[in-house]
Amino acid sequence: MTTLLLITLPLLVALIALGWSLWRLSADPKDTEVLVRALTSARPACRTYEPLSRLFSAEDSAFLRSQRGYSRAIERRLRRQRRQVLSLYLRQIRAEFAQVWNLCRLLAPVSNNPDFGALVMKQFVIFHGLYWTLQLRSVAGGLVPVHADPADLVAAFRQLELSARRALQTLEPAQAAALGV
């Protein structure tokens, strides 16, 4: 009985978190035109988050240890400050992901790619799995061994953004007009 409870409880929590995330993202997108313009621009929005992938570089810690005057207190302070920066980045990337996700939800029914909806949903699950793992890392710090790379989160966002760009490029004028794009 206890084993069954230990297995079903985390699964139930994960399903509730996924449902809650989907419910939060179900808001009607107001700025579809602005988002479409941003997606069709030359520079992807996910480029903003490239420093996030270097935030917990092991090379920085090694460099810090090699410096004169090094102390563990300095390294702890650096880690704490980087966790704070990670938390800020996570909040921002999640907000931008939500905008692209809303656009993808609008594009899914009219997309010429029959696998578009499945691809978008897969990216949603991957992104939020990594997001919550990194949130745990930013809150718990070194107390809980979390093995997630912020670069993977950026890659998941980039993949969703690229999928949205491709779907927008393949829309016929009548479909684009129906979306208000």
Image (cartoon, rainbow, N blue to C red):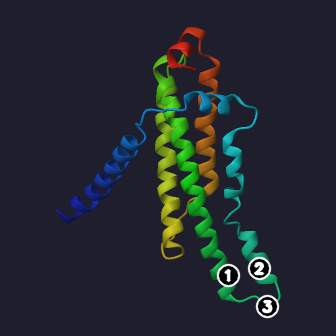
Tell me if mark 1 has few (under 14), some (14-19) or many (20+) residues whose alpha carbon lies within 10 angstroms of its own.
some
Kindly state the secondary structure of the residue where label 1 is placed: helix
Side of 13 where 26 appears, left or right: right
Q: Nearer the viewer, residue 181 or 93?
A: 181
Residue 89 percent coordinates (x, y):
60, 57
Q: Classify 13 as above or below 110.
A: below
Mark 3 or 2, nearer chain start:
2
The residues tagged by marks 1 and 2 sit, at their Cα atoms, a distance apart of: 7 Å
Q: Classify 43 as above or below 107.
A: below
Disc 2 marks a residue whose amino acid type is Leu
Side of 162 where 143 appears, left or right: left
From the image, tell me which residue sits under label 3.
69
Mark on residue 75? Answer: 1
> Mark 1 and 2 residues: CB-CB less than 8 Å, in contact?
yes
Disc 1 marks a residue whose amino acid type is Glu
Mark 1 or 2, nearer chain start:
2
Q: Residue furthest top?
A: 174
Mark on residue 64? Answer: 2
